[in-house]
Amino acid sequence: MKFRLAVMEDLPQLKEVYKGIIKNMEYNQIHIWDDIYPCKFFEKDIQNNCLYVLLNQNEIVSAFALYNTNSGEKSVEWKENQCKVLYLNCLGVNINYLKMGIGSFMLEKAKETAKNLGAVYLRLFVVDINKPAINLYIKNGFIKVNGIYHERIDKDLVLHEYGFEVML
């Protein structure tokens, strides 16, 4: 398998992979992603060189984005605030590759990439109802911090998100 930065040619397949992920999440009563998020942001993520993909031959197996900031970063109590950090977003695994350890593999790749980019911590937010993701992060050494980020999506929808971090 090959891990690399995403390129514009990946965009159509990336969107199809995430449509499958979203359908699977909805089947499992995890209604947090939709037609807008995260798919509408991938083009900008590719342009900004922050979206990474894992490929098996030419098939996208998994992807994630790394950002310098997060809108919820001041909503929780991080261990340290005076060091370089990166935020992991939109980690997804192609539904054809579930239960193969790809999520853990990609978290290791995210840690390695963040460290190579000079980060001391890798942080993320996860919606409180996304139990599979929470379990994956804990299994891979992420520590839940105090506080909850209440992300207002629209007037009728607020997502309650936990912050997690791991020192690199």
Image (cartoon, helix red, strand yellow):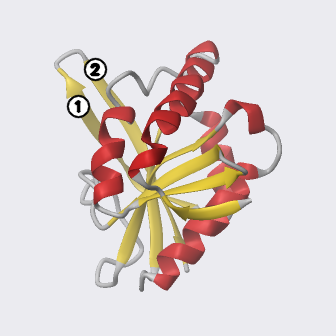
Q: Position of residue 89 (x, y in %)?
A: 43, 51
Which structural element holds mark 2?
strand
Q: Earlier in the sequence, mark 2 or mark 1?
A: 1
Q: Residue at x 66, y 67 (%)?
A: 108
Q: Position of residue 149 (x, y in %)?
A: 32, 45
The answer to whether 94 is drawn above or below residue 84 in the figure is above
Residue type at mark 1: give it.
Answer: Arg
Q: Residues within 10 Å of mark 1 (few under 14, many from 20)?
A: few
User: Which residue in the structure is indicated by mark 2?
Assistant: 157
Horizontally, is 71 left or right of 50 in the view? left
User: Which residue in the structure is indicated by mark 1?
Assistant: 152
Q: Position of residue 166 (x, y in %)?
A: 55, 70
Residue type at mark 2: give it.
Answer: Leu
Pick whichever, 74 or 11, lies toward us.
11
Of the numbered discs in the image, which one, if any, rests on residue 8? none
Q: Residue at x 29, y 61 (%)?
A: 48
Q: Quadrant of the C terminus?
A: bottom right
Which structural element holds mark 1?
strand
Q: Position of residue 152 (x, y in %)?
A: 23, 31
Q: Are marks 2 and 1 in contact (CB under 8 Å)?
A: yes
Horizontally, is 77 left or right of 121 in the view? left
The answer to whether 102 is drawn above or below residue 79 in the figure is above
Horizontally, is 2 left or right of 87 in the view? right
The answer to whether 12 is drawn above or below residue 54 in the figure is above
Q: Residue at x 28, y 20 (%)?
A: 157
